[in-house]
């Protein structure tokens, strides 16, 4: 299954991913986006590979008062290399935490990211809530399920991830969107899949 979480900032998307990694007892590859600190102050973010990489933990942004400045080329170089190495481990669960706006000018990385999503049967990732074409394209894929933590608890997502084994069903709703149900519809545990 290819599951992505979305929701507002600080709602628990990355926490949910990290708990699923700890609890699933399966091999993982891919990356986490983690904060970089200097003098006990967040100074940016870095990519941390979840599989062996010679030069891991590459910083890709510098934090300013109200925004992050992207360090050009880090996604296209390290991020692309990270995903290419992960593609050798397709029996693992691919972790993509997170896909957002800072990488939007890194076209080589974005193409490698989309290719990786094509290749892996099992993905657990985070899609930031941004109106960006590649985020919409990922969410609209027929093989992707998006769970919105603004409308469901991440404990429910963890339960779905650990117990479903692909036993999810879809019901078409308005505007060519789908609702994905796990267990009884009345349980209120659902996500959505955009597109046809």
Image (spheres, rainbow, N blue to C red):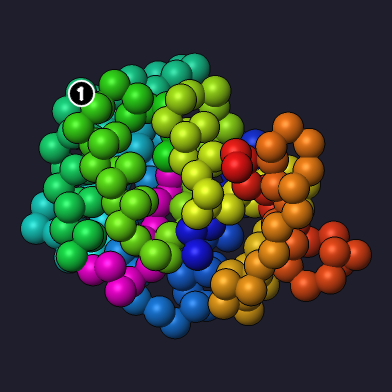
Q: Nearer the viewer, residue 68 or 80?
A: 80
Q: Position of residue 95 (x, y in %)?
A: 39, 58
Residue 109 lies in quadrant: top left
Q: Secondary structure at mark 1?
A: loop
Indicate whether residue 64 is drawn in magenta: no
Name the residue beneath numbered marker 1.
72
Residue under the image location 48 percent in, 74 percent down: 22
The percent coordinates of residue 40 (x first, y second) are 40, 40
Residue nearest the observer in this picture, 111 or 126: 111
Q: Main secondary structure of the magenta part?
A: strand
Look at the picture and state if 102 lies above or below 145: above
Which residue in the rendered view is the most extreme toward the right?
A: 186
Q: Against 85, is 192 above or below?
A: above
Q: Which residues are magenta?
A: 89-98
Residue shown at 69% from the left, 37% from the top: 176
Question: Residue 41 vs residue 50: left or right?
Answer: right
Could you say which is closer to the camera, residue 186 or residue 141? Answer: 141
Q: Residue furthest left?
A: 54
Q: Residue at x 29, y 21 (%)?
A: 105
Q: Quadrant of residue 184?
A: bottom right
Q: Residue furthest bottom?
A: 25
Between 44 and 153, the residue placed more toward the observer is: 153
Specify the quadrant that holds the C terminus.
top right
Q: Is residue 92 magenta?
A: yes
**Is 157 drawn above or below residue 145 in the view shown?**
below
Left or right position of 110 against 145: left
In the displayed structure, 184 sits above or below 103; it is: below
Residue at x 69%, y 64% (from the top left corner)? 169
Residue 170 in view here: yes
Q: Position of residue 57 (x, y in %)?
A: 23, 49
- Asked whether the viewer can see residue 36, the reply is no
């Amino acid at each position: 299954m290819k599951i992505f979480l979305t929701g507002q900032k600080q709602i628990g998307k990355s926490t949910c991913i990290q708990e699923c990694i700890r609890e699933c007892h399966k091999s993982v590859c891919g990356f986490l986006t983690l904060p970089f600190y200097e003098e006990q102050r967040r100074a940016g973010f870095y990519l941390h590979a979840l599989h062996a990489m010679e030069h891991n933990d590459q910083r890709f942004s510098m934090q300013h008062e109200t925004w992050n400045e992207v360090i050009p080329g880090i996604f296209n170089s390290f991020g692309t290399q990270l995903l290419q190495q992960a593609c050798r481990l397709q029996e693992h669960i691919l972790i993509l935490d997170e896909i957002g706006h800072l990488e939007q000018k890194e076209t080589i990385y974005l193409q490698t990211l989309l290719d990786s999503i094509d290749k892996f049967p099992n993905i657990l990732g985070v899609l930031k809530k941004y109106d960006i074409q590649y985020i919409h394209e990922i969410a609209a894929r027929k093989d992707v399920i998006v769970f919105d933590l603004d409308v469901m608890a991440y404990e429910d997502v963890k339960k779905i991830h650990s117990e479903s084994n692909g036993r999810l069903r879809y019901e078409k709703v308005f505007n060519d969107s789908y609702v994905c149900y796990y267990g009884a519809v009345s349980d209120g545990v659902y996500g959505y899949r955009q597109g046809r």
